[in-house]
Amino acid sequence: MSATSRSALVSGVRGGLGQALAARLLDQGVQVVGLSRNRPSAPLGDHPDFDFVSVDLSDLPRLEERLSAVLTGRRFELAILNAGVFGKLAPLADTSIERLRAIMDLNVWANKLLIDLLLRVAEVDQLIAISSAAAVNGSGGWGGYAISKAALNLLMRCFADEHPQTHFVAVAPGIIDTPMLREILAHRPDARYPALARVRAAQQAGQVLSPEAAARRLLDARERLAALPSGSYADIRRLSSR
């Protein structure tokens, strides 16, 4: 890595928003530690200031073992917990506890363990957890995902109360063109899932952002996010309109 003092951590860098966030931070002269199971493609994966760590964040028992040496003694101006999973668009009654547990493990408990480790062995100035408007909307069909993101929001609030040296915020980044979104939109219209119609309408209205545009908007809002009380939840679309 080059001799720069600025450093950030981003999870879920294999593609989508995580990869775009890492790339933009690198363009801003920030060293990036990127976490995901698979290495992102070039040019991100070959950048001299990009330190990639291959880790399965859903493998909770091995997280500390895989990450402790990488994180110990580091100081991050920013950590973005982006990795997450949607699950399936389906009624809660048709969603097994095993599937819900898998969603919670990655979207909530992996982040809990990662934050625990960061606070114990490193320093973090600002920690942003990628949430969703589903956390407050609770729309039909989004059950497991919505529950996990609501829990993630409260996780940030609890950590904020206990660790005032770090600023915590959960952020809904808006609707982004990712494989997750394309999988959702592949479903036929269904009256049981009103949020599906809203997402499809947003796509038709040109309101779906590319990962690069979403990363730019999020990072441009860092100061406004930092001005919120630690532990807050913010929808970036409302924040940007203030």
Image: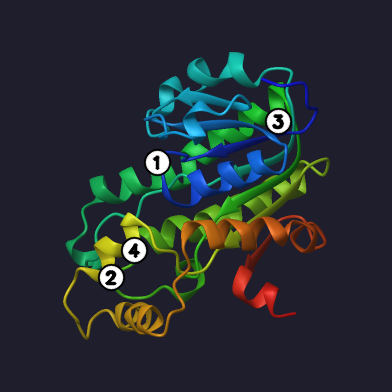
Residue occupying image coordinates x 37% and y 28%: 59
Q: Nearer the viewer, residue 99 or 188?
A: 188
Q: CB atoms at circles 1 and 3 under 8 Å apart?
A: no
Mark seen at residue 181: 4
Query: For the residue carrying disc 2, how many other residues have a C-alpha within 10 Å: few (<14), some (14-19), or many (20+)?
Result: many
Mark seen at residue 76: none
Mark seen at residue 141: 2
Say what amino acid the circle numbered 3 marks: Leu
Determine which residue is flagged by label 1: 105
Whichever of callouts 3 and 2 sits on the residue coming sooner in the sequence is: 3
Whichever of callouts 1 and 3 sits on the residue coming sooner in the sequence is: 1
The reply, left or right, for residue 55 in relation to residue 125 is left
Whichever of callouts 4 and 1 sits on the residue coming sooner in the sequence is: 1
Q: Quadrant of the C terminus?
A: bottom right
Element marked by disc 3: helix
Whichever of callouts 3 and 4 sits on the residue coming sooner in the sequence is: 3
Query: For the residue carrying disc 3, how many other residues have a C-alpha within 10 Å: few (<14), some (14-19), or many (20+)?
Result: some
Marks 1 and 3, how far apart at CA = 20 Å
Residue occupying image coordinates x 77% and y 33%: 6
Q: Which of the 4 quarters of the picture holds residue 32?
A: top right
Residue occupying image coordinates x 56% and y 29%: 47
Query: For the residue carrying disc 1, how many other residues have a C-alpha within 10 Å: few (<14), some (14-19), or many (20+)?
Result: many
Q: Position of residue 78 (x, y in %)?
A: 71, 41
Closer to viewer: mark 4 or mark 2: 4
Marks 3 and 4, how far apart at CA = 32 Å
